[in-house]
Amino acid sequence: LGFSQDSGLNVTFQVSQRNLFGSGRGIDLNISRSDTTRAYGFSISEPYFDDAGLGLQYGLSSTTTRLSDDDDSSYDSDQRRASLALVLPLSEYESLRVESAWERQTLYLYDGYYPPSWIDYINALGDNRID
């Protein structure tokens, strides 16, 4: 729980559990909300995915930012992300991680805050957004 002059009241709920039910699995869940931003995400870790010792981690997240009412930076954005990672333990404290992720971020720009050439380009696309 917090307060910021720019984003108002901030509320965050986060749960992180390692060794879920004694299985070694991990789970992370977070939910965050303020006047300008809403973020949701979760991830799951499976440290014993196969007999060779590989671990698997995957997660999803979503963030929505609304600053169109802000006098300093008028834009909105939506961000979505999905990830998948293989983890190879090298020692008790080290591991090698290979991750692949899909991410999409959309920016919505508004007149009066950006150079006219940017707005002209967006208008030529037929929308006020950039993917």
Image (cartoon, rainbow, N blue to C red):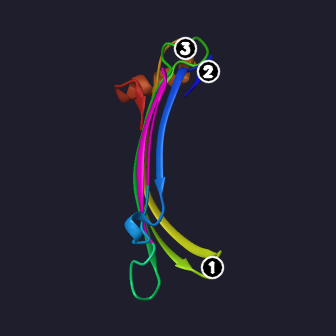
Instruction: Report the amino acid beneath label 3.
Output: Asp
- From the viewer's perspective, is residue 88 above or below residue 125? below
Residue 13 visible at all: yes
Residue underneath mark 1:
92
Magenta stretch, main secondary structure, is strand
Task: Pinpoint residue 118: horizontal percent, then vertical percent.
Answer: 53, 25
Q: Residue 87 appears at what percent x and percent y?
A: 51, 74
- Tag 3 and tag 2, C-beta contact below 8 Å: no
**Magenta residue check for 33:** yes
Nearer-N-terminus badge (1/3): 3
Q: Earlier in the sequence, mark 2 or mark 1?
A: 2
From which residue to which does the magenta span run?
A: 28-46
Name the residue located 42 percent from the left edge and 38 percent from the top edge. 131
Q: Is residue 90 left or right of residue 59?
A: right
Q: Residue at x 42, y 56 (%)?
A: 43
Q: CA distance from mark 1 to mark 3?
A: 48 Å
Q: Quadrant of residue 114?
A: top right
Q: Which residue is mark 3?
A: 70
Mark 3 or 2, nearer chain start? 2
Q: Judge whether residue 80 can be spotted in this image.
A: no
Residue picked out by circle 2: 4
Please report the residue visible at 36 percent of the width from the left and 25 percent of the height from the top: 127
Q: Secondary structure at mark 1?
A: loop
Question: In the depicted view, which residue is nearer to us: 68 or 46?
Answer: 46
